[in-house]
Image (spheres, grey):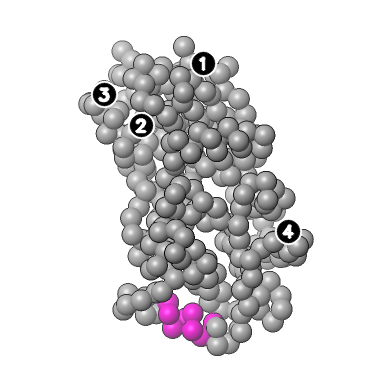
Amino acid sequence: MLTRKDFLPVTLEDRDLFQAHYAKFPQTHSDNTFTNMVCWNSYAHYEYAQKNGTIILASTIEGETKFRPPIGPRDPALLKDLIRLAVEEGDDAPLVLVDEETRVWIKTLYPDLVLSPDRDYFEYVYRTADLAGLSGRRYITIRRQLSRFRRNCSPVVEAITSDSLDEVHDFLVEWCEWKDCESVPFLSYEEDAVFFALRHFNRLGLSGLIIRVMGKIGAIVLYEQMNPSTVVVHFEKGLPDCEGIYKAINAETAAALLGRFEYINRESDMGVEGLREAKTRYHPHHLVEVYCARKEDLKRCIG
């Protein structure tokens, strides 16, 4: 029987375990990636349990716990066990990040269970070629803004290396001061997350780019391979010194990945209206749709 005692905190030492498991069961949602979990641990307190060849993830934010479906071989008995645990230990919506394939499987077992789209956590996935080329009328405004940036700011693009990590650190300190991260709780957690990623850049297998403007770092991006066809952008930061720098780091990331990965996952908009508009403006190829279930509906699955 699955219990809370089966769950262990996700730590940096667990990377090999997750890499091996995700090689067999590739992920499509960034919130399940190992990098996301260890970087955001101070906020979401990630845990995992291993059962019957699967991994089950849980997160606890402000005292409220949510569970994700088992990652691994389909096991109806384990799913029922997880549903029971979610009802006993979880919050009002204790089963989350149910991907489309898993939703179909769950509905074959529990056809009356309501699994509601969790739109705020749909992830935006773009064709790398679209973001690199920005071809066609739908990108005409972005192309003009990008051309203006390149003309006015004379940017230089570099890969992040071990030699540039200290300089990237100083840039992020400046970015956090500009954003006043300490006064905004979520930005404070994001500050913790991005500095953790930078401290463990090589160990996490991250890659990244720098855009310099007048010799100074104006923007950075940190990303990694998520599955054989897709890279996920974990962090993208820019200073307001030169208009259009976010469009530039977006395009340069795609150009660096072109020919190696078909897609770029730029994560969700978390329900932020301005962010949703910005991500939609780039015309995603598809959204990674996820679903959630409420406790009252789950109770009916276990009698």
What's the CA distance linking mark 3 and mark 2? 12 Å
**According to the image, label 1 marks what residue?**
3
Residue at x 26% of width, y 29% of height: 107
Vertical order, 223 against 118 (above or below): below
Dominant SS in magenta: helix
Tell me: 177 left or right of 32.
Answer: right
Residue at x 53% of width, y 35% of height: 20
What's the CA distance linking mark 4 and mark 1? 42 Å
Specify the amino acid type for callout 4. Answer: Ser
**According to the image, label 3 marks what residue?**
110
Q: Earlier in the sequence, mark 4 or mark 3?
A: 3
Determine the secondary structure under disc 1. Answer: loop
Q: Earlier in the sequence, mark 4 or mark 2?
A: 4
**Front label number (4 vs 3):** 4
Vertical order, 47 against 233 (above or below): above
CB-based contact (under 8 Å), mark 3 and mark 2:
no
Q: Earlier in the sequence, mark 1 or mark 3?
A: 1
Determine the secondary structure under disc 2. Answer: strand
Location of the C terminus by quadrant is top left
Q: Earlier in the sequence, mark 3 or mark 2?
A: 3
**Front label number (4 vs 2):** 4
Specify the amino acid type for callout 1. Answer: Thr
Residue found at the very far front of the displayed protein:
259
On residue 162, the disc is 4
CB-based contact (under 8 Å), mark 4 and mark 3:
no
**According to the image, label 2 marks what residue?**
293
**Front label number (1 vs 2):** 1
Give the class, few, some or many, for how many residues have Cα within 10 Å of label 3's Cα (few <14, many ≥20).
some
Please give the range of residues in magenta: 142-149
Specify the amino acid type for callout 2. Answer: Ala
Instruction: Indicate the quadrant where residue 214 lies.
Output: bottom right
What's the CA distance linking mark 4 and mark 2? 43 Å
